Structures are given as structure tokens and as C-alpha cells.
Image: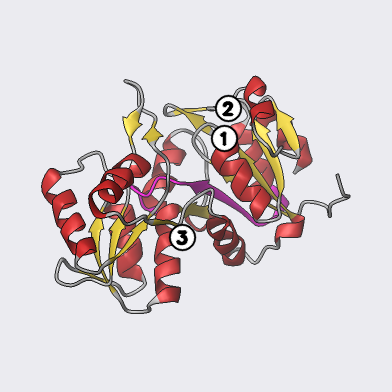
Amino acid sequence: MAERKPIESWLTDMDGVLIHEGVPIPGADAFIKRLTDSGKPFLVLTNNSMQTPRDLHARLSRMGLHVPVENIWTSALATAKFLDDQRPGGTAYVIGEAGLTTALHDVGYVLTDTRPDYVVLGETRTYSFEALTKAIRLIDGGARFIATNPDETGPSAEGPLPATGSVAALITKATGREPYFVGKPNPLMMRAGLNAIGAHSESSAMVGDRMDTDVLAGLEAGMETFLVLTGLTRSEDVERYPFRPSTVANSIADLIERV
């Protein structure tokens, strides 16, 4: 592997890297503190679009992980940034929670079900048949189809839950229209995050627990990649993929000294 520049900035996934089912992973607090004390630019990323950065800051703080609001980057923020770049001041019909609606409002989008420019699908625990039917009809009527992330399932204490990717597949089946997914593994989310903190891919690292989203997104964005084995991907799974992370570590605790 070619020699890379020293790591000057870090992006790290949240679920499976820093926390697991609402509990901090050992070493996560020390890793975040090391990043904060170092002064290096960093972001904590999540493909989940339900919560605002302020909500996530409060949630992490209750667990003893003190991540500033400005260091949290969600697929909802990335989606809002993408739409603001594509069609400033546009309109959207949104299926999602406050994290997504707030991000779109903040960039000046109007949320409407009357001839919207876009149908934007995000994460929610209360997908309704009525809302999905409206989305299908709006897409059939010409609205462009955007989804925050392609994750097919999400974690819960009771087991996997259907997530944005699964619901997007339902809409695609009904309309014949594929969405544009903004979140990981789309490197757009990573590049927008790097731009937000003034970082460069050639001197940045991505830490994640999934080969198919975190590592792939980091790789395609030109970053050094670290896979931790505290989430969904097992060590034996790595060989099944046609690409590899730069480093495989047992947990985030193993990376503290790299900061």
C-alpha cells in the first residue's frame, strides 16, 4: 500500500464504533477526549437521520461521551447540503423525523405536499401507509426521489428494524424510480463532512464497523480506513469483500494512540 500522509483529521461512525445498543464501547470516551485535546478536526458520523446534532450531543453526553454539536455530522445534514447545492430554496415532501426536517428548514427549504421538487425519505420509527402512498403519487407526478441513506435495517434492543433502504425499495417497486442515496457509502457524505471541518481526504481517516458503508465510503473518498470489530462486521467477513480497510482493529480503544 502506498505511503500516506500523517492523519490530521478523523471521521468516525457512531453506532458500533463509539456506542452499542445505547452503551459506550470501552475506550470511546478516551478516544473522543484524545481527539478533543489534540485540536485535530474530527466528526462523529451517523447514517441515521432521525435526530438533530443537538439531540445527539445530549444523548452522547448522558453516556459520558462529550462531542461538541459542531463535531456531529448526520445523513440529514448531508442531504440538506446536497439539496441546497442542487436546487437552493427548493421544496420537498419529507418522510422523517426532526433531524431531517430541521436540517432542510435550516437551508431554506419549504416542506410541502403540493408539487414538491423532491420527495425526501429518511429514518422514522413510524412509517405510515398514508405517507408512503402520498410519496409514491408525488414521485409518479414528477418529484425527484432522494433518500438519506441505504441502510436496510437498524439496530434496536428487540432486534433489527426496517430502515430507510427497505422502505425506499418499497417506493421503488411501486414507482419504478430509484432514489439517490446521500448517506454512506456515498463518498459525497464524507467529502461534505471533510469540507465542513476544513479537512483533506489524503490526510484524513475514517473509522467504522461496517465494510459495506463505512470502509467503502472512506475508501472512495480517498481516506485511510480503520475497521473496528465491535459492530456488524466480523473479522472473517473482511475477506468476502473485493476491497480492504487500511487497518483492522479490535475496538476504538486500539486507536487512541494513533490520534
Name, please, the residue furthest toward the front.
176
Q: Residue furthest right?
A: 3
The span from disc 1 to disc 3 (Cα, nearest Å) is 19 Å
Disc 1: which residue: 210
Do labels 1 and 2 touch, CB within 8 Å? yes
Q: Amino acid at mark 1?
A: Arg
The residue positioned 71% from the left and 38% from the top of the image is 245
Front residue of 153 and 29: 153
Residue drawn at x 24%, y 69% as measured from the top left: 142
What amino acid is found at the position of numbered circle 3 in the picture? Ala
N-terminal of the two: label 1 or label 3? 3
Specify which label sits upstream in the sequence, 3 or 2: 3
Using the image as rendered, state which of residue 63 and residue 183 is in the foreground: 183
Find residue 78 and name its label.
3
- Which quarter of the picture shows residue 33? top right
Measuring 65% from the left and 67% from the top, which residue is drawn there? 198
Residue interval drawn in magenta:
37-52
Residue 113 position in % (x across, y down): 15, 66
Q: Position of residue 250 (x, y in %)?
A: 68, 24
On the rendered structure, is 51 left or right of 34? left
The quadrant of the picture occupied by the C terminus is top right
